[in-house]
Every structure is written in structure tokens, then in C-alpha cells.
Amino acid sequence: MRQASAVHKPKLYEQVAERLGEAISAGTLRAGDRMPSVRQLSASERVSVSTVLQAYVHLESMGLIETRPQSGHYVRRRERPLPAEPQVSQPAASATPVSVSALVARVYRAASDARIVSFGAAFPSPALLPTRRLNRELALLAREAGEVAIEYDMPPGCLVLRQQVARRSLDWGCPLAPEDFVITCGASEAIHLSLSTVARTGDTVAIESPAYYGTLQAIEAQGLRALEIPSHPRHGMELDALESALKKRKVAVVLVVPSFSNPLGSCMPEENRQRLVRMLAERGIPLIEDDLYGDLHFGPQRPRPAKAHDTEGLVLLCGSFSKTLAPGYRVGWVAPGRFREKVELLKFAQTVATPTLPQLAIAAFLRNGGYDRHLRSLRRQLASQVQRMVEAIGEHFPEGTRVTRPEGGQLVWVELPRRVDALVLHERALEAGISIAPGPIFSAQKRYGNFIRLSCGFPWSPRLEGALATLGSLARSLA
């Protein structure tokens, strides 16, 4: 009597194909990625070239990879369409007192836990930054700078750093001189100083909606009122809506993030920037321009700041190196135009000076070259991570989810079905070891109850994709 057939044992090429298939499923190899070369995989798997070729044929028959003539094998792009984009925001047309700090603190206490998968905090992974080189610069300066390294660097701040930033401004299409800049403790202080300079308690500040919660906290801290202006997910603040608002009420200052705003990731077209500056100049209204993400464009050309169109000195241009070099160094700057003297006085009154060594280290890094090369690498990495995030949201999140398509920066803004409460999702995600930024912290009016912001600042990995799949499952359970 014949014995029953033995269980099929996968052939060698099938085992290789299975391991590669798992890497594709886990997100280690993603749509559009080039597969290892045949010879490279033959060596790493310790199999023959013919076995690798058979494995690739098998994966191709399964629809997982494709062959491109004279180029190699690539992971096939998913045929599933990407989610739709959110529509233009529709905030209420009234100025509102701001009170978001308590909720923001609750969200960010959780995000600081190293055990949490952090989709909630908008900073890049240290793995993407030139940490070792900066640390070497810092150590060298600490040894050689002598007393200079521990002295106050009074406003406007370190001259060699201001010279380097002024040289960078040539690349922005907005040539500025070293004396145009005041060095600050990050872009946050630059925004605070700018608001303190041009607005008084009770004044109204026109902002994008949704708006970065840090901006809302600055407005709250100074006793100002926020007027939220409708914003387009790709083009930013709707200027017709802003112009209409300016005709109806007194606005002390307009604060915008034209390049890759937080949280939308929108990028204001050049002609809109020009119109915005002209519109405000005609009314004598200052413009605070937050250009924090300007260097993180995915396209070939850096967007020119609105400051490039400023002929009246009414634009206060703010930025920092926190998103491109060293978040913890807290080195930023403001080019405050006609308000420079008052900004310098306020800087001295509030924090006296920005720490000297971090200024010198960044100046040395810029002066010694490599910053542009670093930026090119960082932009490629972030563009890939944003694309992967959008694809994964389309795969794991509930039907009807919408997500932005940023062309720079590291953030995506996700609109969930109306039944999903972002604050409830935030709490349940934390229980699962995942942090997100819920929509209500991005509005003085506590809007966006079914929106979340997700950060793409960390290299994609199976752990991240697994966490996003869990987050999508939690969102589906609430939909």
C-alpha cells in the first residue's frame, strides 16, 4: 500500500522568493524600489544565479515585481488608487481667543515616550541628520574657541552665522545682508518676537486654517485673537477669503507658512505670494512669514519666500535649522525688515542671547560645505517616506479617508470619515503604543474633529508599517 504523499517542501528558488515577498509585504521593499541585483542576491543568499533568476520569475508571475529592460527588477507599483485629497477648509469667519496649550501638552507628553511609535511629533529622525559631523564641529570648537564659546553672543547674534545665512538667501532668490538677520532660539522664538513686535494684547492675527498648534500657542500666550482663513490643501491660504476678511475687520498682522505648511503641507504659488505681499503693503499690515520648511522641497526648485517681493520692509521672515540639521541646537533666525531694531531689543529683554557654541557649529558646517549635499539626500528620503505613508494610508485606513499630497516637508494631513473622533482615536492609539496629532489642536475654533496629522520624519520600516496598519484598524473600528 502506497503511503500518502509527503507535504510539499518549497524548492530553493521558492524559499528565496518567499523571503523577498515578505520584505515587500513588510514595506522593507516598496513600490518603485529596485530589487537587489542578481549577483548581489546570489552572494547574500548563497544560491546560484539561476536560482535567483527563477525566484524573480516567480515573483513576477505573482505580480509583485516587474523587469525593466537594461535596468533591472523593480517592485511593482500598487494598482490601488491613492486616497482623494481633502477639500478647502471652511472655518468660521470670526476672530477667536485661543486656548489649545492644555490639549497640546497632553498630546506631547505621550509623544516623548521612546517606547511609542511617534507619528505625532514633527521632527526628523536623527538617522537622517549629519549628527556625527555636527558633534565633531561642536567638540572642536569647544576645544579651540576659548572664552568666546562661553560668552554671551548679544543680539543680533553670531556674525559668521549671519554671514552664512545671508549667503543661503541668494539661493532662495531673496538676497539679504548679514545685518538683516537676528539669530533666535529656534523659529518658535522668531515667531514670538515677531508677534510681540507688531501686535498688542487683544489684536487679531489672520492665520491659515488648519494652523500649526505652536503658532496658536504663541497667539494664546500674547493674549491675541486668531482669525482663521480658509486654506487649500495644495495652495495654502485662500487670498480671496483673506481680502474679504480684511475689508470687514481690523487685522493687526497676517501669519502664514507659504512653503509646505504645518499641518497641510501646502505650497503657495509664486503669484499668490506676490499678491499677498502687495495686498498687505497697500494696507500697511505686517506679514510674518514662517519659512521653516522651505529647504525641504521635493521638486528641483526651492520656492522663493514671500519676502522676495517685499519692498516696504513689512515682511518678517522666520526660519531655523531645526528641521534640516539639529532640532536640539535651537538655532533659528528672523529677518524683520523695518522692525529689526525693536526685535533686537525684545530678543535681549526676553532671552539675552542664543547659545554661542551651537551657532558657531552650524556656521562652521555651512562654511565647510556639504550642506547642499545633505539637503539633497534628506529631501529624497523624506519624499520617499511621504509617498510610502500616503500609499499605506490608502491600504489600511477606512473607506472615504482623504490625505494631502505635500510637495515638500514631512507631514500629511488626514481626513477620516465624519464618525471618527480624532481625540478618541488618539487615546486608543496611545494604548496601542502609537502617537498621533489630533486635528482639534490645529484650530482656535477646535475644528477638525475627524482629522489627524501624521509625521513622515522617520525611515520607513516594518515596525512603522505595522503601527500604521494598527492605526488604520483602530480608525476603521470607529468609522
Image (cartoon, rainbow, N blue to C red):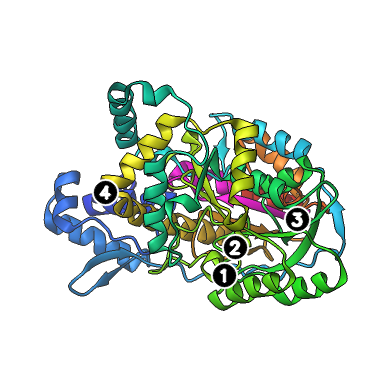
**Mark toward the start of the polypeptide (2 vs 3):** 2
Q: How many numbered marks have been drawn onto this rendered protein structure?
A: 4
Label 3 and label 1: CA atoms lie apart by 41 Å
Whole-percent x, y for residue 16 in the image: 26, 50
Of marks 3 and 1, the one in the foreground: 1
Q: Over which residues does the magenta segment extend? A: 447-469
Residue that carries the numbered disc 1 in the rendered image: 311
Q: Nearer the viewer, residue 311 or 292?
A: 311
Q: Which mark is residue 202?
A: none
Q: Toward which corner of the image does residue 451 lie, by quadrant? A: bottom right
**Mark toward the start of the polypeptide (4 vs 3):** 4
Q: Toward which corner of the image does residue 447 lie, by quadrant? A: bottom right
Q: Which mark is residue 313?
A: 2
Residue that carries the numbered disc 4 in the rendered image: 369
Give the amino acid type for the residue marked by disc 1 in the picture.
Answer: Thr
Whole-percent x, y for residue 218 in the image: 71, 44
**In percent of the image, x 80 and y 70: which residue is there?**
246
Q: Toward which corner of the image does residue 273 lie, by quadrant? A: bottom right
Of marks 4 and 2, the one in the foreground: 2
Q: Secondary structure at mark 3?
A: loop
Label 4 and label 1: CA atoms lie apart by 32 Å
Label 1 and label 2: CA atoms lie apart by 6 Å
Label 2 and label 3: CA atoms lie apart by 40 Å
Q: Is residue 1 in view?
A: no
Give the amino acid type for the residue marked by disc 3 in the picture.
Answer: Asn
Q: Which mark is residue 450?
A: 3
**Mark toward the start of the polypeptide (4 vs 2):** 2
Give the amino acid type for the residue marked by disc 2 in the picture.
Answer: Gly
Label 4 and label 3: CA atoms lie apart by 45 Å
Label 4 and label 2: CA atoms lie apart by 31 Å
Say if 414 sits above or below 284 in the image: above
Q: Residues within 10 Å of mark 1 (few under 14, many from 20)?
A: few
